[in-house]
Amino acid sequence: GLAARGILALTALPLLLAASLVQAERLELGRFSSGELDGWKQQEFAGLTRYRLVRDGESRVLEATSEGTASAWYLKRKIDLRRTPILNWSWQKVQSVEVGDEAQRAGDDFVARLYVVKDGGVLFWRTIAINYVWSNHFSKGDAWNNPFAGSNARMLSLRDAGDPSDEWFAESRDVQQDFLRLHGEQVDSIDGIAIMTDTD
């Protein structure tokens, strides 16, 4: 893709899975606002995106800065979607990524993407994923196949170029329903989650 600079800020406490808004069960995956990074690791694809905890007013947030790089910040953990199917998080675009067609390999760059992954194990071709993305090319609600993984990784635009910078947006997705809609499969658990800002 184009060498560019993309910056994402992600709040910590809202990055969680929950049963519903009325039930008490919550599984906190990213307690970044508490300064906790336990279990999170970095996976490099094309240079290292810089992930760090920074202050945003009274809160601490995870900031991702990419300058011609692509690496993911990931948590490997089995999560029962029958108990906690709703994924909640907040994110903010600080600086846009200037890209081409995000459905093509050369333009597959995003200021923000959040992956949920169902691991196929030894049947690696059975691994499927959803990428919730902040698109600069597609509109909100658009879905397409990942240009590298094909239909095994479905892209879903939740935010687009029309959403302003420096404003926090809260998201809430029923991951189980999204797998059924985008992959046509009933998925009762996922095996990990990842955050990525990439501009390679």
Image (spheres, grey):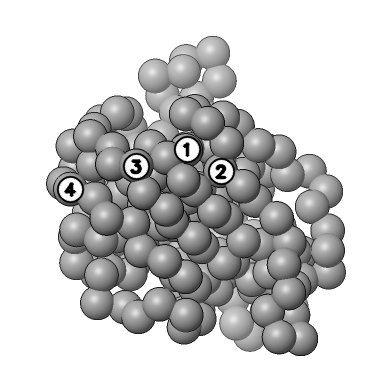
- Crowdedness of circle 4 by 10 Å Cα count: few (<14), some, many (20+)? some
Which quadrant is the C terminus positioned in?
Answer: top left
Residue 100, disc: 4
- Crowdedness of circle 3 by 10 Å Cα count: few (<14), some, many (20+)? some
Q: CA distance from mark 4 to mark 1?
A: 16 Å
Q: Amino acid at mark 2?
A: Thr
Secondary structure of residue under mark 3? loop
Residue 200, can we see it?
yes
**Circles 2 and 1: CB distance less than 8 Å?**
yes
N-term-proximal mark, 4 vs 1: 1
**Circles 1 and 3: CB distance less than 8 Å?**
no
Q: In percent of the image, x 83 and y 69: which residue is there?
A: 34
Residue 49, disc: 2
N-term-proximal mark, 2 vs 4: 2
Q: Amino acid at mark 4?
A: Gly
Q: In percent of the image, x 51 and y 62: which residue is there?
A: 8
x and y, in percent, of residue 115 in the image: 48, 47
Q: CA distance from mark 1 to mark 3?
A: 11 Å
N-term-proximal mark, 1 vs 3: 3
Label 3: which residue? 3
Task: Left or right? Give the position of 75 relative to 180.
Answer: right
Which quadrant is the N terminus positioned in?
Answer: top left
Q: Amino acid at mark 1?
A: Ala
Residue 70, disc: 1
Task: Choose between 75 and 59: the one closer to the eye.
Answer: 59
Q: In percent of the image, x 76 and y 86: which residue is there?
A: 58
